Amino acid sequence: MVENDRWGIFLAHLILIVGVAIVVFPVYVALIASTHAPGTFLQGVMPLLPGSHAIENYSTVIFEGRSNAGAPPIGLMLWNSFVMAMMIAVGKIAISLLSAFAIVYFRFRFRIFFFWIIFITLMLPVEVRIVPTYQVVANLGMLNSYWGLSIPLIASATATFLFRQFFMTVPEEMLEAARVDGAGPLKFFKDILLPLSVTNIAAMFVIMFIYGWNQYLWPLLVTNDEAYYTVVMGIQRMVTGADSEPLWHLVMATVVLAALPPILVILFMQRLFVKGLTETEK
Amino acid sequence: MQTKRMTFTNNRWLPYLLLAPQVTITLIFFVWPASQALWQSMLRQDPFGLRTTFVWFRNFERLFADPHYLVSMKTTLIFSVSTTLLAMSVSLLFAVMVNRMIRSRDAYTTFLVWPYAVAPAVAGVLWWFIFNPSVGILPYMLRGIGIEWNHRLESSHAMILVVIAAAWKQISYNFLFFLAGLQSIPQSLIEAAAIDGASRSKRFWTIVFPLLSPTTFFLMVVNIVYAMFDTFGVIHATTAGGPAQATNILVYKVYRDGFIGNNLGSSAAQSVVLMGIVIVLTVVQFRWIERRVNY
């Protein structure tokens, strides 16, 4: 620090504490709301201290759901979200590792052309071409399936770029040594490149898991069978599915359950998360 | 584009095999649908879906003559500019403050990064609940100062609601990049200015802020892209474009016209316009990255 000004530091702490409070506030409110009985919300403004119905509310949403309002049990939706997020994260990493390996370690015809095809995918988010993509998935008979939920989202250039950048930094001597020892490309990939990329793979996994878990528009389009609803889109059904005022205590319990897994991933893998986030954008 | 100095040879098919999964998925789910959107944007179906005619650019002409579309463009502009400004200014403030801390830096960072994990739709529902006219806390407090909050009827209230929800989620992302940017500014420059007698705010505006401009510019593009395309969930889960189209941003309109209104030609034309916007933004971003390399 340049100068020692105690008031400045004090003021900074004050601003940050208020800031953190504002950032945390919505989730705090959701947590509190999910512990109250339904009647609480009829009496006007919601309370700011926890109620006593937490276990009851959470077991209702996890095991029973609200079949009358078109919402299956959250347990199933959480499982679907998990499967979808895992398939997207693992799939993206697998195909990106392979294609980055091909682009960096081989010389072949149309290499630049393929590079550009992959690059294009960086540019167009699903949101801008939803109708035709939906038609393709429908024609392939992939509606209402885990494949339909995950495969169209697996292609993305971000991970390929990260791995390409990383492979370029791997010393040439590694490859030379491997070739002197008679290792073929696949052996080199499996025994040398993969072990070296573990940190990058983990960082990518954190980002992609969150990306997959938080998908909203895509599951909304390709599923109309309750058995494949994911939890993030399921919330919307609970809010608008019923004609009356939503059952806030159950909606908020669902919100907490939907937000918790990715938040835990970030908190426990903060370093990997920051690494993954800042390096993919370079 | 370079490869390694030494590469594997004598493998004629292997590189193609390795690329096959990625390229196949890209072709089926990206290139094909995007070209379909281009094609469909020049077709028009009759109301019963029996006949399709090729109409060249008439869908686009209609689109840009449609007052609803122009209003939606304006709404998108207001929405993305406000979201970007709010999210960036708040996170810059946080980053500057956290950067002054030594021991508590990591603790504050942990508290500020996790909203990144919250899905836009979930963020929308959270703020929708807080702002709920009958049970929410903020309307209750606003009533105390004489404001009757109702985002179901008041367009401006609905807009404020979605802007806050969208910006809240983006704070952590901006914060991390601003903090990284601040930490890469050489401390010696700031010390030199301090010795010359520049006050703290003068140091910030004449040294730190200009040096941070690459980060700021990068974040600006990212935030605009986020506000334009990733906020579908915020809108759909809360206001559904209402009241009276007040929050009907372009991405939401594509969805609504295509899936609910079943107007495929118009929806495809809108998709093409959006793709154009994305491509322009991406090009802007890459030109900037090139410039930074030459810095």
Image (spheres, rainbow, N blue to C red):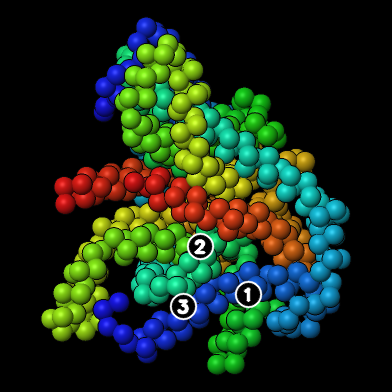
In percent of width and height, residue B225 lies at 40, 53
Q: Say which residue label 1 marks.
A: B130
Q: In this view, does A170 lie above or below B198?
A: above
Q: How far apart are marks 2 and 1 (CA)?
A: 21 Å
Secondary element type, mark 1: helix
Q: Distance between the residues labelled 2 and 3?
A: 13 Å
Quarter of the figure with residue B68: bottom left
Image quadrant occupied by the N terminus of chain B = top left
The label shown at residue B113 is 2
Please give the chain letter of the residue carrying mark 3: A
Would you say A175 lies left or right of A127 here? left
Q: Return the disc, 2 or 1, that comes first in the chain's sequence.
A: 2
In percent of width and height, residue B228 lies at 43, 54
Quarter of the figure with residue A115: top left
In percent of width and height, residue B39 lies at 42, 30
Q: Say which residue label 3 marks.
A: A16
- Report the amino acid beneath label 1: Ile
Please give the chain letter of the residue carrying mark 2: B
| Number of the front mark, 1 or 3 | 3
Check chain identity for marks 2 and 3: say if they share one: no
